[in-house]
Image (cartoon, rainbow, N blue to C red):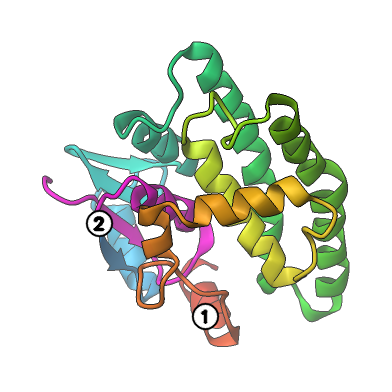
Amino acid sequence: MSGKPKLHYFNGRGRMEPIRWLLAAAGVEFEECFIETKDSLTKLQTDGSLLFQQVPMVEIDGMKMVQTRAILSYIAGKYNLYGKDLKERALIDMYAEAMMDLNELLMSYPFQPEDKKEQHLANAVDKAINRYFPVFEKVLKDHGQDFLVGNQFSRADVQLLEILLMAEECKPDILAKFPLLQKFKAKISNIPTINKFLQPGSQRKPLPDEKDIQKARKIFF
């Protein structure tokens, strides 16, 4: 297990997408082993590759890492995207945890039953506008810097950009009342490694369609 990190997941966003984003932001090339069937997932589970019998799993530096947050923390630390001291790391973790909460809401929206989709989306948008985005707008305003923590590019910036773009997919004008987040989105999107990841043909996954949803259901449920 050497060379490029190897990502094991289905060919879609899900919980692997923040990991793809962070590796891409760090300028790290990675390979993907797509889980196409329930049998291929079962094989990983039975051959001891999955510590807790679940994906995402990333092969990196001789390890088979599972648990999304642990993987993100490792990548951030390895590629200097985790602040300069313990206090900055705590802030990054705090912000990232909130982003993961919102990410779960947005990510799960396409998988909701039809009769619950509208309410689920309304709840996600409400929390984005009234709970999460005002905090990050205030953080940027209070310290007057370009990045969320320590005026240095970090994991928190990568994850926030991903969340902003996901939220705009659900509600295009969701950032209308957040001018600093709009400015932040433009600046972070133009960082060369991220700009490359945002281009067509990259390993960034699109918003799932009905075919993707049904395929994921067959694999994981």
Residue drawn where x is 44% and y is 28% of the image: 82
Q: Nearer the viewer, residue 156 or 116?
A: 156
Horizontal and vertical percent for residue 29? 24, 55
- Residue 107 in sight in this render: no
**Crowding at mark 2 (Cα within 10 Å: few <14, some 14-19, many 20+):** some
Quarter of the image where the C terminus is located:
bottom right
- The magenta span reads 1-30
Question: Where 48 sits versus 37, above or below?
Answer: above
Please give the residue where the numbered disc 1 appears in the rendered image: 212
Residue drawn where x is 35% and y is 37% of the image: 75
Horizontal and vertical percent for residue 149? 57, 27
- Residue 90 in sight in this render: yes
Residue 120 quadrant: bottom right
Please give the residue where the numbered disc 2 appears in the rendered image: 30
Q: Is residue 28 left or right of residue 182?
A: left
**Crowding at mark 1 (Cα within 10 Å: few <14, some 14-19, many 20+):** some
CA gap, disc 1 and disc 2:
22 Å
SS at mark 1? helix
Q: Is residue 78 magenta?
A: no
Q: Amino acid at mark 1?
A: Asp
Q: Earlier in the sequence, mark 1 or mark 2?
A: 2
Looking at the image, which residue sits at the far left?
2
In the image, which disc is placed on residue 143?
A: none
Horizontal and vertical percent for residue 85? 45, 13
Horizontal and vertical percent for residue 106? 69, 60
Q: Nearer the viewer, residue 122 or 192?
A: 192
Q: Amino acid at mark 2?
A: Phe
SS at mark 2? loop
